[in-house]
Image (tube, rainbow, N blue to C red):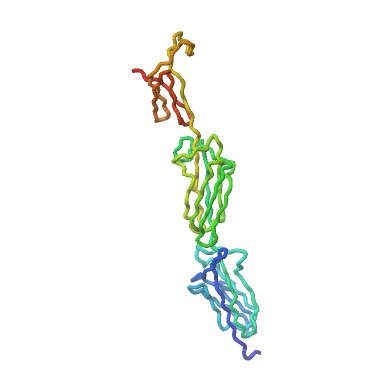
Amino acid sequence: MLESFHVALLLGKLDFQRLDLDAGLADFELQFLVDGIELDCITLQGTITRTTVTDNNGNYLFADVPPGECEIEIDPATAPPECNIVIPECPIEITITLPPGVWNFDIDFCLAPPLGEIGDTVFCDYDRDGVQDAGEPGIPNVLVTIDCVSAIGPDISTSQLTDVNGNYLFTGIPAGVCVVSVDPTTAPPDCNVIIPECPTVETVNLAPGQSYLDADFCFGQPPGEIGDTVFCDFDRDGVQDPGEPGLPGVKVTLTCGPVVLMDTTNAAGEYLFTDVPPGKRNIGMVFQ
């Protein structure tokens, strides 16, 4: 039987890791196999099991550890929600062989913050109210760009095209301030007009692990023109024949939903309404 043995120390740090940023996690319970950072060591004296909790800087220490094979494991369930993701680069279980009298200060662990996502739809806003109503289709192949100033690592800038339904989704986004924008030059010519109800840029303050699916964008259809002539139809055939003059000063109304526009014919009897949005329109004259 061994009368005495050398005592060793195990010291490490639990890291908040995201890309190239490290910061210790406080009050993170570590465990060896069971409940905490738990230390399981098979020594000449038998098996020992210990549990500890990281300090305010994410450090932990097991003192008076007999030599032998030791397994150290952390419990991710005790990590704070802003940094509790297990990643391949950071194993949560490490096995070492501790020689007599050795101080091992390199048994570090790390976890990563949860990543979020930002997305929604780019659509054609027929009624120009900024809301995607029934029958207003998504627009495919519109370029959407996201630029994020990350709170925990390098900034992010990437782009993608909307799918056949006008949807897009950026995944794997760290917490921070993100600016999402659409490129109007990539919208189709039949629906590419920037309208006040549909900004082309949106800023999102993304929390760790947040799924923000309300960053939608829209465009309006290009407006058209309606016009012609009010004339005196001598032969009453509905066609302006040679010698049938235009009538000046006639008031003409154009009804676009709740909006009623008015114009007055010129000296040749001509009228013209510009910037008329697409849709069914009613045209009439005002008789006094």
Q: Residue 105's x, y, as percent? A: 58, 78
Q: Residue 221's x, y, as percent? A: 50, 35
Position of 218 with respect to 97 (left or right) is: left
Residue at the far left in the pictured view:
288
Q: Residue at x 61, y 68 (%)?
A: 91
Looking at the picture, tell me which residue is in the foreground, 8 or 257: 257
Looking at the picture, tell me which residue is in the foreground, 152 or 104: 152
Residue at the far front in the pictured view:
267
Q: Residue 288's x, y, as percent? A: 33, 18
Q: Quadrant of residue 267?
A: top left
Q: How many marks?
A: 0
Looking at the picture, tell me which residue is in the foreground, 175 or 7: 175
Looking at the picture, tell me which residue is in the foreground, 214 or 230: 230
Q: Residue at x 50, y 65 (%)?
A: 80
Q: Residue 252's x, y, as percent? A: 40, 22
- Please state, as top left, top right, bottom left or bottom right, where the N terminus lies in the image: bottom right
Residue at the far top in the pictured view:
235
Position of 31 with respect to 229 (left or right) is: right
Q: From the viewer's perspective, is residue 41 above or below residue 167?
A: below
Q: From the viewer's perspective, is residue 60 above or below residue 241?
A: below
